[in-house]
C-alpha cells in the first residue's frame, strides 16, 4: 500500500501538512505493508487515523482509546508494534484528543457527547474496512473507550467480528462507589494517612467537585503501581513525530477531563450506565479483561456486568498484578485473544 505522505519527516508541521486519507480501497491482492497516518473526514471534522501492519490483508483491529482525551497513536508502535505482523492496527484520535485536537482546537462552547463519538467510531470502522477491503474489524476498547466501543458494538454489530473490552467501564455510579470503597479500604490497610485524608475529603460519589476524581486517582494510581507489573519505560515516550505537539496533547487531556467530569458533576461520564441504557445482549462475541488491582473500574462491577451479558460467546479474564492502565500482562492477554479470534477459536 502506497503511503499517503512522506514518513512524517517534518514533525513540527505534521498536522498542517498531513493529507487526508482517502476511503478508496488500497490493499493489493498480494498484500503489502501499510503505514498510513492522516486526517479522515469523520462527522464533519478532520480526525486523525493511523493504520499499521506488515500485510494489509491481516485482520483489522480498531482500538478505541480511553480518557476521554488519552490518544494512543503517539505510543502505538511501542504498545502494539509486536502485533503488526499478524494484524492491521487502526488507531483513531477522538474529538478533543491527540492530533484531532491539534487540527481542531475546540471552542469554549464545544461539548463532547456519547452519541456523536459513537457515530464517529462507527464511521472510522466503516472507513477502515472499506480502505482495507475487509468486511469486519475486531473492536477493542479500554476504560472510557470501552463505553464507546460497547455503544458501537450494539449499534452496528455487522461491522465487528468480536469485542474485547479492557478495564470495562460499566456504570459511573457503580464503578465510582466501588472505587471509593476500594480506596478507603486500601488506605486504611496500609495506614496511609495522606491517602485517607484525600479519600475522606472528597467522600463517596456522586462528586460535584471537578477535582475529586483526579485527586482520588492520584492516590489509587500509587496503590496500583505498588501492586502491579510495571510497564516498560519506553511505552509512554512520545513517538518522534509527535513530540512537537506535546503541549497540545496536555491541553487535550485537560479539556477532555473537564468534559468527562463536568464543573458540577455534570460531565458526559456521569450518566453512563451501560446495562440500563443499552441492555446486556450482544450479537457478537464478547471478551472482557479485568485487572485485580484496577481501582477505576473494579472487578466486582465488571463481574456483575459479565454475568448479565448474553452473547454468542463470552469470556472474562481476570489478571493478577494488573491495574487500570496498560501493563505487559494486559497487553499480552489482548494479543492472545486477538490471535484466537483471528483463528476462529
Image (cartoon, helix red, strand yellow):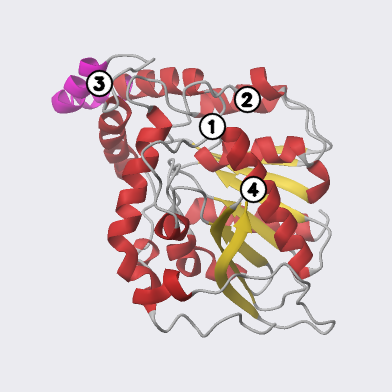
Closer to the chain start, of discs 3 and 4, is 4
Disc 4 and disc 2: Cα gap in Å?
17 Å
Horizontal arrangement in the rendering, residue 170 relative to residue 102 (left or right): right
69 or 41, which lies in front? 41
Disc 2 and disc 3: Cα gap in Å?
26 Å
Residue shown at 66% from the left, 21% from the top:
277
Describe the element under mark 3 as helix, strand or loop.
helix
Q: Which segment is the magenta one?
A: 185-202
In the rendered image, which residue does mark 3 sit on? 199
| Mark 3 neighbour density, 10 Å: few (under 14) some (14–19) many (20 or more) | many
Disc 1 and disc 3: Cα gap in Å?
21 Å
Q: Which mark is residue 169?
A: 1
In the rendered image, which residue does mark 4 sit on? 121
Tags 1 and 2 touching, CB below 8 Å: yes
User: From this viewpoint, is residue 295 visible?
Assistant: no
Q: Position of residue 222 (x, y in %)?
A: 27, 40
| Mark 1 neighbour density, 10 Å: few (under 14) some (14–19) many (20 or more) | many
Closer to the chain start, of discs 2 and 3, is 3
Amino acid at each position: 500500500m502506497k503511503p499517503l505522505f512522506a514518513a512524517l519527516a517534518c514533525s513540527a508541521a505534521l498536522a498542517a501538512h498531513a493529507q487526508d486519507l482517502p476511503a478508496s480501497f488500497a490493499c493489493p491482492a498480494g498484500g503489502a505493508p501499510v503505514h498510513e497516518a492522516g486526517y479522515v473526514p469523520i462527522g464533519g471534522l478532520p480526525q486523525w487515523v493511523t493504520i499499521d501492519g506488515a500485510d494489509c490483508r491481516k485482520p483489522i483491529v480498531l482500538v478505541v482509546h480511553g480518557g476521554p482525551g488519552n490518544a494512543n497513536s503517539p505510543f502505538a508502535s511501542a504498545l502494539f508494534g509486536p502485533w503488526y505482523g499478524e494484524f492491521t492496527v487502526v488507531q483513531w484520535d477522538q474529538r478533543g484528543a491527540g492530533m484531532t485536537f491539534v487540527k481542531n482546537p475546540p471552542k469554549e462552547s464545544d461539548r463532547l457527547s456519547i452519541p456523536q463519538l459513537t457515530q464517529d467510531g462507527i464511521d472510522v470502522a466503516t472507513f477502515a474496512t472499506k480502505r482495507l477491503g475487509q468486511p469486519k474489524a475486531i473492536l477493542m476498547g479500554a476504560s472510557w473507550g470501552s463505553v464507546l466501543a460497547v455503544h458501537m458494538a450494539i449499534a452496528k454489530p455487522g461491522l465487528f467480528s468480536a469485542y474485547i473490552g479492557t478495564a470495562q467501564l460499566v456504570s459511573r455510579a457503580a464503578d465510582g462507589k466501588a472505587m471509593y470503597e476500594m480506596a478507603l479500604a486500601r488506605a486504611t490497610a496500609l495506614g496511609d494517612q495522606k491517602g485517607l485524608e484525600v479519600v475522606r475529603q472528597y467522600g463517596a460519589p456522586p462528586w460535584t467537585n471537578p477535582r475529586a476524581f483526579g485527586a482520588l486517582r492520584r492516590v489509587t494510581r500509587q496503590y496500583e503501581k505498588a501492586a502491579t507489573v510495571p510497564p516498560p519505560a519506553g511505552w509512554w515516550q512520545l513517538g518522534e513525530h509527535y513530540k512537537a505537539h506535546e503541549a497540545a496533547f496536555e491541553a487535550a487531556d485537560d479539556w477532555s477531563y473537564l468534559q468527562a467530569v463536568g464543573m458540577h458533576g455534570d460531565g458526559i461520564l456521569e450518566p453512563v450506565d451501560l446495562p440500563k441504557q443499552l441492555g446486556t445482549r450482544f450479537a457478537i462475541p464478547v471478551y472482557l479483561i479485568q485487572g485485580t488491582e484496577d481501582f477505576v473500574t473494579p472487578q466486582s462491577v465488571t463481574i456483575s456486568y459479565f454475568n448479565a451479558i448474553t452473547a454468542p460467546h463470552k469470556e472474562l479474564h481476570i489478571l493478577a498484578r494488573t491495574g487500570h492502565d496498560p501493563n505487559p500482562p494486559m497487553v499480552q492477554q489482548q494479543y492472545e485473544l486477538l490471535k484466537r479470534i483471528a483463528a476462529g477459536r
